Amino acid sequence: MKLGTKIIGNFGAMHPLWFGEVVAIDTTKTPECKVNWEGPSGGHTWMLLKEINDAVGKLSPIGYYTEEAYYAS
């Protein structure tokens, strides 16, 4: 994971996708990143790097994904 990576949050069929970007990475303890979200709600989320699925072809219905993994599946 690197700064500028695009992230997509998928929370199920009844909810719109969230689109964000990694703006900070902290590996001092447990590796985590800060994602700034676009749209009317905006804001940011700190999340563990292992919560973001970046494996192409391994999508589940709900979760956080890199843009590359989401659209390649």
Image (spheres, grey):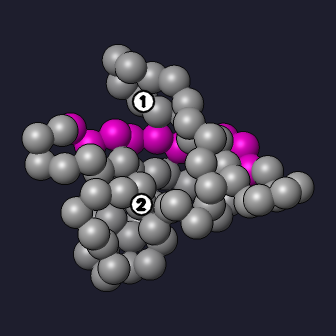
Q: Are marks 1 and 2 in contact (CB under 8 Å)?
A: no
Judged left or right of residue 59, residue 24 is right
Principal secondary structure, stretch drawn in magenta: strand
Q: Which amino acid does label 1 sit on?
A: Glu
Tell me the residue that label 1 is attached to: 38
Tell me the residue that label 2 is attached to: 65
Q: In which quarter of the image is residue 69?
A: bottom left
Judged left or right of residue 73, residue 37 is right
- Residue 20 placement (x, y as % from top left): 46, 41
| Residue 11 visible in this rendered orientation of the protein | yes
| Span colored in magenta | 16-25
**Residue 56 or 28: which is nearer the viewer?**
28
The local crowd at label 1, few if under 14, some if 14 to 19, many if 20 or more residues have their Cα within 10 Å, is few
- Residue 67 placement (x, y as % from top left): 40, 59
Residue lying furthest front: 30
- Residue 14 placement (x, y as % from top left): 11, 41
Image vertical order of residue 49 relative to residue 12, above or below: below
Q: In which quarter of the image is the C terminus?
A: bottom left
| Residue 22 visible in this rendered orientation of the protein | no
**Residue 47 or 4: which is nearer the viewer?**
47
Judged left or right of residue 60, residue 30 is right
SS assignment at label 1: loop
Q: Is residue 30 located in the magenta-colored stretch of the structure?
A: no
Residue found 62% across the figure and 41% down from its top: 46
Q: In which quarter of the image is the N terminus?
A: bottom right
Real-space CA distance between mark 1 and mark 2, rounded to the nearest whole angstrom: 15 Å
Q: Tell me the number on the disc at residue 14.
A: none
